Amino acid sequence: MKRSNEPIIWLLFGAGGMLSALVAPVLVLITGLLVPLGLLPKDTMSYQRVLAFAQNPLGKLVLLAVISLFLFHGVHRFVTTLNDYGLRGGHATMALFVGVATLLTVVTAGLLIGIGF
Amino acid sequence: MGRHQAVAKTYRRTQPVDWGRNVHRRRYMRREMTSVFLIAYALVLLFGLWRLSQGEAAFDAWRASLGHPLALLGHAAIFIAALYQTISWFQVMPRTLPDSQVKPASITRAGWAAAAVVSVLVLALVMLGGGK
Amino acid sequence: MTAQASQRTIRIEAMRFHPETDSEPSWKTYEVPFRDDMSVLQGLQYIKDHLDGSLTFRWSCRMAICGSCGMMINDTPQLACHAFLRDYMPGPVRVEALDNFPVVRDLVIDQTPFLNKLEAVKPWLIPKTERTPADGPNRQTPAQMQKYQAYAQCINCLLCYAACPQIGLKPDFAGPAALALMHRYNIDSRDQGWPARAEVANAEDGVWGCTYVGVCSEVCPKAVDPAHAINQNKANSALDYFGLGKLLAPSEGAK
């Protein structure tokens, strides 16, 4: 029987799942609701503050981890669900979506480096 | 396939898998569907990061757009999905860990507690201007 | 003896299929006299004894230990001896052959797919070195036995296979019971068989066929928790994938 290559994506899926389980609600709350509704101090998400965060090495790591791992986690689950609904060619689809997630990870890294230190 | 031979004359029912069949399957689908919302949020952040790289005007415009009613509605939906992900993830997690004397329910509650603590910490960090 | 008032009955709708004559299943309805201590199995036995001797179904122990009488009862896989007519009053009770298996006749399914999967996981002790009677008893402590106790309770009733949507989608998936029994042997202190079973575990149709729907553990009448067995072995399989399989062989023997 052929060995499955699932472990690679499964580890990424697991990391993304743990990270999102811990921080997704609060991040969505802050960036998507509290700040736009003005319930936090005016400069919470100011250009200067966010730029400083993105230029900080630790901040870069956080942004890369959140964007990339959320994508890998979501993509794995989404394609699995497509398979659940009878989609044929599951492997090709998974490869495609994981490829896109990888590409977007590279784009994120590129943007973070481009923003400077 | 194996040394057991299948019975010759049988009937194979070919109904497609019914994901609405029972409460367990419905719960599973709801859980898995949170994935779409997490992808959406990652893309929102990526877009914001891109606007950040384009300078203050671009970033401010993006931040302002987050106040649009549709954006608020969308993020409210994502928030509910994220909460559901947190709750269900720690319900599942004990059964991905090796057998132990610790009750699965205890691990679940510890996970939820950790998420609550992390959330408070992040909120504090953001508000006190230390990190994000 | 109390005077017999009008006897309460309950309607049982049973799936019928005779391969000699039918191209697909049909339903037959029976009115069965009801007592509140009757199991669904007893209802079927009444039908066979008094109403329709051609109704075919497996049964044996009547006490949820042999695993013979698994069937779909109102869309849920259950042991017929373990489900009670009183819980379905006023009825009807719909009884079908277990999902996800070929139907041989009426409520009897072909277990062959499962039997082959079970043999594939080598459900027997595989010690590092062969033992003979001269080696004496193969001892283990109560704590070591406790480790795999729950997973050893499997009665091969196949309710978990009927419940599992992934078995429905991918009939070659090894499935809950086979993988739970694989785990039972892997964590037995007298066994060092992870390498021998790894090929099955690591395959697409091994542990990676599971998406943790979790219904298997919900329907298991013996609380085996196959969902836990499978999903903790994803981590093991991942370790194995990255060349750390050596960590998975437990140390040999009891003290």
Image (spheres, coloured by chain):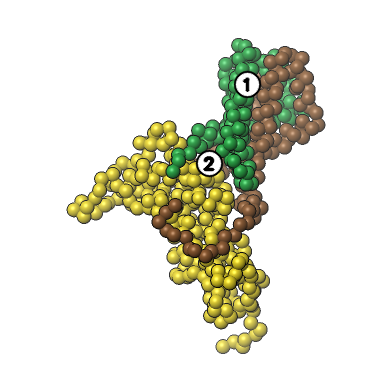
Task: Give the residue at x 61% y 39%.
Answer: A79
In this view, the residue in front, A81 or C204, is C204
Chain letter, disc 1 residue: A
- Disc 1 residue type? Val
Task: Give the residue at x 47% y 45%.
Answer: C206
Q: Are marks 1 and 2 in contact (CB under 8 Å)?
A: no
Chain letter, disc 2 residue: B
Q: Quadrant of residue B47?
A: top right
In this view, the residue in front, C226 or C211, is C211
Task: Give the residue at x 55% y 57%.
Answer: C100
Chain identifier, colour brown? B
Q: Quadrant of residue B5?
A: bottom left
Chain identifier, colour yellow? C
Mark 1 packing: few (<14 Cα in 10 Å), some, or many (20+)?
some
- Disc 2 residue type? Met
With C32 as the anchor, is C109 left or right in this view? Answer: left
Q: Position of residue A111 (x, y in %)?
A: 64, 17
From what the image shows, is residue C39 above or below residue A67? below
Residue C41 visible at all: no
Q: Quadrant of the C terminus of chain B?
A: top right
**CA–CA distance between discs 1 and 2?**
31 Å
- Pointer 2 residue: B93
Chain identifier, colour green? A
Residue C33 visible at all: yes
Q: Are marks 1 and 2 on the same chain?
A: no
Furthest residue toward right: B69
Determine which of the numbered discs, if any, sits on residue C216 in the image.
none
Q: Position of residue A11 (x, y in %)?
A: 51, 34
Determine which of the numbered discs, if any, sits on residue A107 in the image.
1
Q: Position of residue C165 (x, y in %)?
A: 58, 51
From what the image shows, is residue C195 above or below residue A64? below
